[in-house]
Each structure stands twice: as C-alpha cells, then as structure tokens.
Image: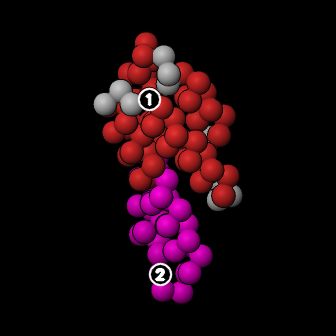
Amino acid sequence: MLVISKQQVAALIRKLPDPAYAGECRNEVKIMLEIEAALLSRATDMLQPCCGSLDTIKSCLAAETSLLEKTLDAIDINDYSRAILYLQEYVLCLEALPR
C-alpha cells in the first residue's frame, strides 16, 4: 500500500510556488488523490454497523480527499497560494490520524 508522508507534502508545498513545477505538482496531487480515494473506498466497503472506529477513519479520509480535490482545482486556476493552504490543512489531517 502506498503511503503519503508529511515530508512528501512538504516538498510539494516548497515546489508549488514555482510555475515551472506546476504540472509536476498537479500530477503528484492527482496521485495522492487516487491513493486517498482507494483508501476511502476500502474503508467504505469494510464499514459494518459494529465497526464504529471505521466510521471515524472514513470521515477523515473523506476530508483528506476533499482537500486534495480543492488543491487540484486551485492549481488548475493557478491559485498556488490557495493550493498551499489546502495542502497545509491536509498535513494537519495526516497528523491527526495514525497511519
């Protein structure tokens, strides 16, 4: 399973202000979004009424996915400062949920 690290996101945040890296950064966010979507799908498939803790994980993954989608949208309109804010919020989500 692929894991998204805080260091990976920090490196992405450092590159994002440079328009020369816009395409590369967009691709990285897209890959991260695919990873989150796969994790969310697995959590949803595994969710059973008796498994309340999975509901918390599902909520966290949904929030992370939403942030990455917003990041992609911001990159697409060249709003790199907003994309950086979304990625910083994403890092906070990564820190909140043990991996």
Q: Amino acid at mark 2?
A: Gln
Q: Which residue is mark 2?
A: 48
Image coordinates of residue 33 in percent, x first then y, are 42, 44
Q: Amino acid at mark 1?
A: Tyr
Image coordinates of residue 94 in percent, x first then y, are 62, 51
Find out whether residue 6 is within the magenta segment. Answer: no
Depth check: 34 or 12 in front? Answer: 12
User: For numbered disc 1, what is the local secondary structure?
Assistant: helix
Check whether the beta carbons of the residues at disc 1 and disc 2 lie within 8 A of each other: no
Q: Is residue 92 above or below residue 20?
A: below
User: What numbered label is drawn on residue 80?
Assistant: 1
Main secondary structure found in the magenta portion:
helix
Residue ID at (63%, 40%): 5
Q: Is residue 61 above or below residue 25?
A: below
Q: Nearer the viewer, mark 1 or mark 2?
A: 1
- Closer to the N terminus: mark 1 or mark 2? 2
Residue range highlighted in magenta = 35-64
Depth check: 62 or 1 in front? Answer: 62
Number of other residues with Cα within 10 Å of mark 2, as a class: few under 14, some 14 to 19, many 20 or more:
few
Depth check: 40 or 21 in front? Answer: 21
Quadrant (top left, top right, bottom left, bottom right) of the C terminus: bottom right
